Amino acid sequence: MVRNDSPFLMVFSVALLAIAPLTGGCGAPPDGRPERVAFQARVNMGGSPVEGAVVVLSPQGVGGAAASGIADSQGVVRFNTFEAQDGVVPGDYGVSVMKTVVPDAPAISPDDPAYDPVKAGRAPQPKDLLPARYKSAATSGLTVSVIAATQVPHEINLDP
C-alpha cells in the first residue's frame, strides 16, 4: 500500500476545495453578454391561443435587453435576446404583441379584361390581425417582470 502524506499535497487539495465554489456559476455567461434566464409567455385572445403572434419585450429603465419570439400553435413564446431561445435578461419590460398577414396578390394576366395596369404594380397592404394598441409597448398596457427562470409560461391575455 502506497501512502502520500505530503504536506504540499494536503495544502494544495484543501486550497482547491476552498476555491472551487468560487470559480463557476456566477458572473456573466461565458459569451460575455448579460446573464439570461429561460422565460416563456403564452399569448391568448378571447381564451384562444394566438399562433404566429410576434411578442417583443422592451426594457423599462436601466438595464435589460430587448427580447422577442413568435407564438407556436399553443400560443407559447420562447424568447430570444442574442440568439435563438437564449432567454431574457432579468428586468422589467413593456410588452408589444402583433400579428400581421399580407394577402396574396390576385394573379391577373395583362390579357384579362379586368387587368388594370395601375393596380397591377401595387403590392397588397398588410393587415393587422390584433387590435392596434398592442403593437407598441407604450400603448399596450402590458408589462412583465423577469426575475428568474420559469417553467410555467407567463400569461399574456389580449382583449379583442
Image (spheres, rainbow, N blue to C red):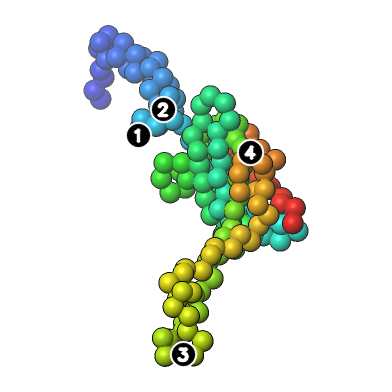
> Dot 2 surroundings within 10 Å: few (below 14), some, or many (20 or more)?
few
Q: Which residue is mark 2?
A: 28
Residue type pointed to by label 3: Asp
Relative depth, front residue between 3 and 92 = 92
The mark nearer the N terminus, 4 or 3, is: 3
Q: Amino acid at mark 4?
A: Ala
- Taking the view exactly as shown, the residue that stands out farthest to the top is 7
Helix, strand or loop at mark 1: loop
Residue at numbered disc 3? 112
Residue that appears at 53% across and 24% down: 62
Q: Quadrant of residue 93?
A: top right
Residue 73 screen position, x and y as percent: 59, 63
Mark closest to the chain's N terminus, 2 or 3: 2
Circle 4 residues within 10 Å: few <14, some 14–19, many ≥20: some
The quadrant holding residue 127 is: bottom right
Dot 2 lies on which element? Answer: loop
Which amino acid, by three-letter code, is at mark 1? Asp
* Residue 31 image label: 1
Which numbered disc, 4 or 3, marks the residue closer to the eye? 3
Q: CA distance from mark 2 to mark 3?
A: 63 Å
**Foreground: disc 4 or disc 1:** 4
Q: Residue at x 42, y 90 (%)?
A: 111
Pick the quarter of the image with the N terminus: top left
The answer to the question of whether label 4 and label 1 lie on touching residues, with beta carbons closer than 8 A, is: no
Describe residue 116's horizontal placement relative to residue 55 as left or right: left
Q: Secondary structure at mark 4?
A: helix
